[in-house]
Image (cartoon, rainbow, N blue to C red):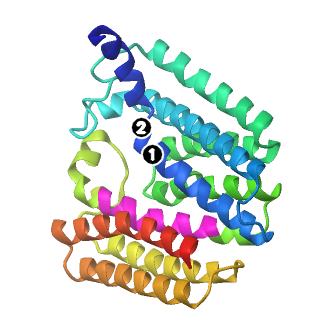
Amino acid sequence: MNNINKILLPYFELTKPRIGLLVIVTAYLGYYLGLRSIDSHMLQANEWVILAHLMIGMFVSCSGACAFNQIFEASIDAKMDRTKKRPLPLKKISSLSAYIFAMCLFLISSAYLYLFVNSTVAILSCTTYITYLFIYTPLKRKTTLNTLVGAIPGALPPIGGWAAATGHISSPAWIIFGVLACWQIPHFLAIAIIYAEDYKKGGLKMLPSVYPKNKITSIYMIFFTVALTCMSLGLSFIKGNGIVFVVGSLILGLIFIYCSIKLILNNSLKNAKRVFYYSIAYLPILIILIIFS
């Protein structure tokens, strides 16, 4: 049994399951809101079946993308303290084995989503691969704008959820996309502040690494927390979100803005961690508000 675990564990680590969990949660959010937009309340058996297929397909798709990302960045990961113990830098598995594994996950997930959900979701899954692996990942070595670009593939899962529920992509789905895209910027910039030196060692062009004493990172964070608050209020236009949601999301947003302002006034590690931890709490609370309002 120990030998089996030793063989399988590196492949499991390649998939970054915590990111996969976030993907299926946000895909569920899009699915739920999509159904609510057409006056459905998940009372039919086939709606639950489609949701199950969506979550399985999305999780496998995300796992493949994460595995490919580690293949592409193996040399960078080897230089950074927070990533040097990943399977490829430690040579627990070969690059070829990792590539075959990642390709299998990509092909299986794409076919699965196409056959059991719909073609729109399958295309969105492939689009996520393209933007994440072939646009965002190379940009991390070239420009500090990579975080903005990376928010695009990270915000596509709820669009997929909406398309799975309705069969198409309509304007409210892009509000959900905007919420998730805006949330990612302060979240990942806070991480970039915390690990600024590590990113610098890896040769990644993150704002806090390139401009360590400049307030530009904090300005970005304030701008996108304000945008996030406005976008979340925009969700009230989707059928079913009333005054409880509006007040709750406004309070959540104002606290987020306050944390970002504290950071621009005092660009300390403590304040960066405050933004990071609050960003982790913000998203599940917002989702709970959406579902129960």
Q: Secondary structure at mark 1?
A: helix
Q: Over which residues does the magenta segment extend?
A: 176-191
Residue 215 visible (yes or no):
yes
Residue located at (60% from left, 56% from top): 28
Q: Give the labeled residue for mark 2.
A: 16
Q: Which image quarter is the N terminus in?
A: top left
Which residue is more in the foreground, 257 or 160? Answer: 160
Gap in angstroms between the C-alphas marked 1 and 2:
6 Å
Residue type at mark 2: give it.
Lys
Q: Are marks 1 and 2 in contact (CB under 8 Å)?
A: yes
Say whether residue 212 is magenta.
no
Which residue is more in the foreground, 15 or 21? Answer: 21
Q: Give the labeled residue for mark 1.
A: 19
Say whether residue 184 is magenta.
yes
Quick check: 89 above or below 73?
above
Residue 213 visible (yes or no):
no
Q: Secondary structure at mark 2?
A: loop
| Residue 195, horizontal then vertical, whole percent | 24, 52
Quick check: 64 above or below 91?
below
Indicate left or right for 255 with 250 as reference: left
| Residue 241, horizontal then vertical, whole percent | 63, 81
Which residue is more in the foreground, 14 or 264? Answer: 14
